[in-house]
Amino acid sequence: MADISIKGLHKTYPGSTELATNNVSLDVAEGEFMVLLGPSGCGKTTLLRMVAGLDFPDEGSISIGGRDVTYLPPQDRNLSMVFQSYAVFPHRMVRTNIAFGLMMKKVPREEIERKVRWAADLLQLSPYLDRYPAQLSGGQRQRVAVARAIVMDADVLLMDEPLSNLDALLRLDFRAELKKIVQQLGSTTLYVTHDQVEAMSLSDRVAVMKKGQIAQLGSPLTVYEEPADRFVGGFIGSPPMNFLDGRITQQGALEVAGQNTEAPEFLARAAARTGGSPVMVGIRAENIAIAERGTEGSLDAVVEVVEPLGHATLLTVDLGGQTVKVQVPSTVRVSSGDKVGLRFDPAALRFFDTETQLGLTA
Amino acid sequence: MAAPDAPAAARPQLPPARPKGRPPRRSGNSAALLLIAPSIVFMTLLFGWPMVSGILQAFGGPEGLTTANFSRMVQDPYFWSSVGNTLLLIVVMIPIQFVLALAMALLIRAKPRGSSAYFYIWAIPLAVSDLAAGLVWLTVFTDRGYLNSLLASFGLDPVSWLAYDNYPSMFGAVLIAEVWRATSLVFVIVVAGLQSIPKDYEEAAGVFGANFWSRLWHVTLPLLRPSLQTALILRTILAFQTFAVALALTGQNFPLVVGETYRWYTGLQDPNVASALALVVMAVSMVTAVGYLKLLRDQSEAPR
Ligand SMILES: Nc1ncnc2c1ncn2[C@@H]1O[C@H](COP(=O)(O)OP(=O)(O)OP(=O)(O)O)[C@@H](O)[C@H]1O
Ligand SMILES: [Mg+2]
């Protein structure tokens, strides 16, 4: 088992001027489950490919288990990988696809058979073992790719959106299974996903990437509750965090849409010195409550759209010209056009610099 | 099926209530027939007719149909040696050509500096006619050719490479010339085949611990099978027809089957036996092609 240490990785693809990864440094502890999360094209696959040895960085280094592997070919790194494109061999049956890595390692035949059966059972592939990939559905092919990776017992497991093509129910199932398997194997895991629920539920830590850089690295809850900048807050969560233009007045109040509420200490103190400053306020939909209009500490707003989601109701609310998403329990009865008051949970308020978009903390 | 804006003329009697997705049989067939008519005419005139007349000629004699031409063919002292030479050439040459072509194609796939230049250089022999290639190599192997000058410059005695009593060196010369001339065909086909295989598969094999040779054996070659099959069929059939290179290099000293056809037709002025020989070459080529197709059938395609 091995830890991964990535230092200052720069990579530009030939023929492109943009950096696919820009000075990425990341340490993944032994046995840790690290999720890479980020919008399409931000360099997640590129990073994974460099860890796998399929591409070499222009600058920087990668070591696995203390051994510098930056320019080592993939077969000498003892890792296994689920490719975003699956890369399931079309000329081999499911059985021999799953067994491929074990056959390369010259594992005894009975052992291979046992492991293939185990993985096929786990991923519900047993009925298809004697089929060719062309005879499988997309989701089944993806599961073959996952099975091929997990039978390896590799030190490092790289997974590039391994559940992207499964239906919601199956994905929920496999998410839990995968977590269990990876814990059993104890592999150090780098896992790429677009799905933030997946990221939150699986990971020990999340690295949110943006344009080839790591925007924030932290535990799933930290990343969710305390986004380092506006991008992270806007990317994670469904609906994403609300961002409102506000001001801290010299008197130490937070002014949003011409109405005042309480501002946190550290900002009030700074504002008293500078004579007030604009600030961007971030708050998640579930941290806003609906109150009677005019109650103490609430902001006047008008409901525009009501979307019942089942477990909750999502409101789109107009707050002095700014649109705010609010999530309320489904028992709350409101309809569009209602004049309501909004009450922000003061502990959940986040503040961002209007220029750098970086989070402001005490 | 038929696009909504398909010209109405293509299916004139289409009844309005016809269930969708089933094109009207009759009119579809006649349209298709009309479309392939020109090629049918061409094939009949340029291919079918000469073949039929060739077959008739092969079995033709002064008193109607006969197999006498075939017995004359077989009794000719050169016949069996030409068959032996042709087979030996094929058996030795084709593996060499495939290994070479594959190595060159893989080298290009690895994209070293100037790989596109290599491609064009290696493809050049494709454009050289076989007789010209034979003459070029004659300047190398002839008694006062480049090879002997080279030997002389090292102070070695010259060798009569193409002498009729030096069979191994004669065979070697024909082999080298043919390998030089015809490997590029295999090479071009293999390069095209390799380009159609996504790199993912090899990459995946590498990640799962396969070294270069296992990747080649377990992944690249099986995926390349359709291209290899095409190249093998083409190359073998063409190898049965090897002729001008051997003629230019050795004259009659290294007879090949198609060379015999030529000799019967022009030298011995007997078109009937020449046709019989040509027929044998055709039959052997067809049997080989079918054999390859059967032998190399892609199992992952079969059950689909
Ligand atoms: N082979 C390549 N040649 C040139 N540019 C590339 C190549 N592969 C990726 N890129 C570019 O590098 C950037 C990062 O790509 P990458 O595949 O790492 O994104 P990603 O985060 O995996 O995206 P997705 O979530 O859509 O898979 C993109 O801008 C992409 O266009
Ligand atoms: Mg990707």
Image (spheres, coloured by chain):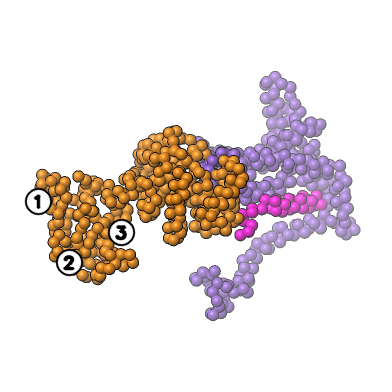
Instruction: Give the image location of residue B53, x and y in percent.
Output: 78, 58
In the displayed structure, A152 sits above or below A346; it is: above
Instruction: Give the image location of residue A163, x and y in percent.
Output: 45, 54
Q: Nearer the viewer, residue B67 or B42?
A: B67
Q: Which residue is drawn at the image coordinates 27% and 59% (left, top)? A: A286
Label 1 or label 2, whichever comes before in sequence order: 1
Q: Secondary structure at mark 2?
A: loop
- The mark lying in front, picked from 1 and 2, is 2
Rounded to the nearest angstrom, the CA distance separating label 3 from label 1 is: 33 Å
Tag 3 and tag 1, C-beta contact below 8 Å: no
Kindly indicate which chain is depicted in purple in the rendered structure.
B
Residue assigned mark 2: A292
Rounded to the nearest angstrom, the CA distance separating label 1 from label 2 is: 26 Å
Q: Chain of mark 1?
A: A
Using a 10 Å C-alpha cutoff, classify the residue at mark 3 as few (fewer than 14 neighbours), some (14 to 19) or many (20 or more).
Answer: some
Q: Nearer the viewer, residue A177 or B16?
A: A177
Q: Nearer the viewer, residue B169 or A241?
A: A241
